[in-house]
Image: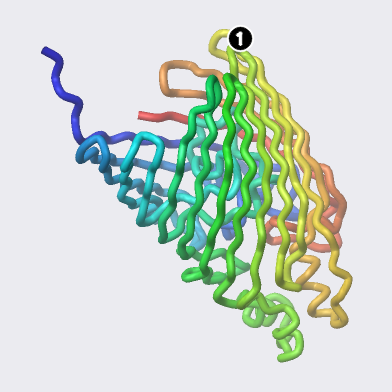
Amino acid sequence: MAEPESAFSLQGFGTLGMARTTSNDVEFVRDLSQPRGISQDWSGKIDSVLGVQGTWRVDPQWQAVVQANSRYRYDKTFTPDVAWAFIKYDPSPNLSLRGGRLGTEFFMMADSRWVGYSFLTVRPPGDYFWYLPFYSIHGADAAITIPLGESVFRAKTFFGYSDGKIPLADEQWDISGSPMLGVYVDYQLGAWQLRASYANIHFKNDLPLAPVLQKANGVTLSAENAAFLTTRDTRTHYYALGVVYDRGPWQAQLMLNHIEQGSNALESSDGGYVLGGYRVREVTPYLGYSWVRSQSRGNATSPVAVYVQQDSHSNQNTTFAGLRWDVVRNVALKAQWDAVRGDASSLFPYRQDRRGSWEGRMDVFSLTMDFIF
């Protein structure tokens, strides 16, 4: 007689990574959640992570999930953080309801951005994912799954309040309590998966521009500029379309997004990437290309406002190539080269930018070991 399946399970994931760039004019970051980045010296801070997840299946309909991880975060530490903590209820095979602390799913594959083993590349392509420093919400979601012959249709909607901070120089932009909502529809047929999504966030607080400008340039933010550059009570909209193919030795992805910023302090943008890989036994070489273009507003009339808007400008593309070696079960070694090619005005989202000497070009070299257990 077979033993009953355990009601509690524990899994984990992690990445040990090292990376460096060819420039000291800016610091390269994984995304906006990181206050400092890397330059010409090898560093393990931007990609290294360790996470654990516990799942308690109460019965076929109810389960509780908690996930915690340690990664380089907004306060320049690796302090462990609870990423997920939710209750899931499946009233029927086609309907799933969750409530609690949930991961964000603005873009396809966004909820597993720190599980390096689940990605073919060393890290999610930055030109596409940089603009998502949101990793969790306090709220609820509902998902419905409908089989359609040999295909499957799935839709999910969510609502909640953001919980986190985004670093800005030595300050933090507190986005806690900002309401977020979204929806996506997903269609899967064989090896193909297509997803269209929409989400938005209504910011509760302003950017900490006054102390940042005072420390950086000795500039006092006037009431007029503060009002012009406000983020409080503005809304950012996210639109995305993704296509994934995964069958046999071939893997391919195409992702596109448009981000509409409601504040004068931030520029709207378009981005995307295309990626292909071919597996030969345990080794998968891959090649990709990503891009991001933000639209200059051109409506600033003061030098201070112009300076702030320039900090959110991005105009670059990245060619990346690498190799993934699944050396043993649940362990993958990766090596990747990124060739960033932009113009001198492309400052977002780099840290410690040296305007005037940065030319918009650098190479990034990365080595990682990803694992799950």
Look at label 1 and name its amino acid.
Answer: Val
- Tell whether 92 sits left or right of 167: left
Of residue 294 and residue 76, the one placed in the foreground of this image is 294
Of residue 131 and residue 76, the one placed in the foreground of this image is 131
Residue 36 visible (yes or no): no
Taking the view exactly as shown, the residue that stands out farthest to the bottom is 223
Q: Residue drawn 52% across and 69% down?
A: 178
> Residue 278 appears in which quarter of the rendering?
top right
The vertical placement of 366 against 181, above or below, is above
- Tell whether 289 sits left or right of 189: right
- Tell whether 6 sits left or right of 330: left
Q: Residue drawn 30% across and 50% down?
A: 87
Q: Position of residue 277 (x, y in %)?
A: 66, 21
Q: Position of residue 195 (x, y in %)?
A: 62, 38
Residue carrying label 1: 280
Taking the view exactly as shown, the residue that stands out farthest to the front is 149
Under circle 1, the secondary element is loop
> Residue 94 appears in which quarter of the rendering?
top left
> Residue 252 appears in which quarter of the rendering?
top right
Q: Residues within 10 Å of mark 1 (few under 14, many from 20)?
A: few
The vertical placement of 290 against 294, above or below, is above
Residue 14 visible (yes or no): yes
